[in-house]
């Protein structure tokens, strides 16, 4: 079982999701199955089949989240002194030399969400930034072409 790096915030989010799945969704689905069963013939009962499918999805997600938590290697960047170096969990403030300023937090696979500016550390941009320092100029090859950045700042929170 290979450990996966995750931020403290990412682990907390998964734990909260697991509680919701087990303590809220699971009982709701069980109640929906019981209600659908009370309507009689299960072969032609669409409510029953929908509830069973929902139960299957919920239980699958519970197993997935439990597996992620079990394999989690929690990295707390606030306890690491890196003095301007880009590491897993750090927030990087960049100047895209072609367009605008942008910031990304470098996170694990299960936390990545580009809309929230959370990028996977093994993505092209994540790999290109890891190990670089504040004020470095970085050229990163992405599927959309080569991007040029200047690292303006690196924060650890």
Image (cartoon, rainbow, N blue to C red):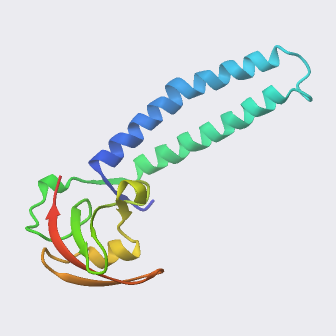
Q: Is residue 30 above or below residue 128?
A: above
Horizontal relation, residue 58 to residue 66: left or right: right
Residue most toward the top?
A: 38
Quadrant in which residue 41 is drawn: top right
Q: Nearer the viewer, residue 59 or 147?
A: 147
Q: Nearer the viewer, residue 90 or 8?
A: 90
Q: Is residue 113 at all visible to an observer of this figure?
A: no
User: Residue 53's spot in the image, x, y percent?
Assistant: 73, 37
User: Residue 25's spot in the image, x, y percent?
Assistant: 57, 28
Q: Nearer the viewer, residue 152 or 90?
A: 152
Horizontal relation, residue 18 to residue 119: left or right: right
User: Residue 123's spot in the image, x, y percent?
Assistant: 40, 72
Which image quarter holds the N terminus?
bottom left
Q: Is residue 25 above or below residue 89?
A: above
Q: Is residue 17 at all visible to an observer of this figure?
A: yes
Horizontal relation, residue 21 to residue 88: left or right: right
Residue most toward the front?
A: 99
User: Residue 55's spot in the image, x, y percent?
Assistant: 67, 33
Horizontal relation, residue 71 to residue 91: left or right: right
């Amino acid at each position: 079982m290979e450990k996966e790096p995750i931020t403290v915030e990412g682990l907390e989010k998964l734990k909260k999701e697991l509680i919701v799945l087990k303590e809220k969704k699971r009982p709701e689905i069980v109640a929906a199955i019981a209600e659908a069963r009370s309507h009689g013939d299960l072969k032609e009962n669409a409510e029953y089949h929908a509830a069973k499918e929902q139960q299957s999805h919920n239980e699958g997600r519970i197993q997935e989240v439990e597996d992620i938590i079990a394999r989690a290697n929690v990295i707390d960047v606030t306890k690491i002194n890196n003095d301007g170096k880009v590491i897993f969990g750090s927030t990087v403030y960049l100047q895209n030399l072609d367009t605008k300023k942008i910031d990304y937090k470098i996170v694990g696979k299960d936390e990545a969400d580009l809309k929230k500016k959370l990028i996977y550390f093994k993505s092209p941009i994540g790999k290109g930034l890891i190990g670089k320092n504040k004020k470095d100029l970085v050229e990163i090859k992405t599927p959309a072409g080569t991007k040029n950045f200047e690292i303006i700042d690196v924060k650890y929170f």
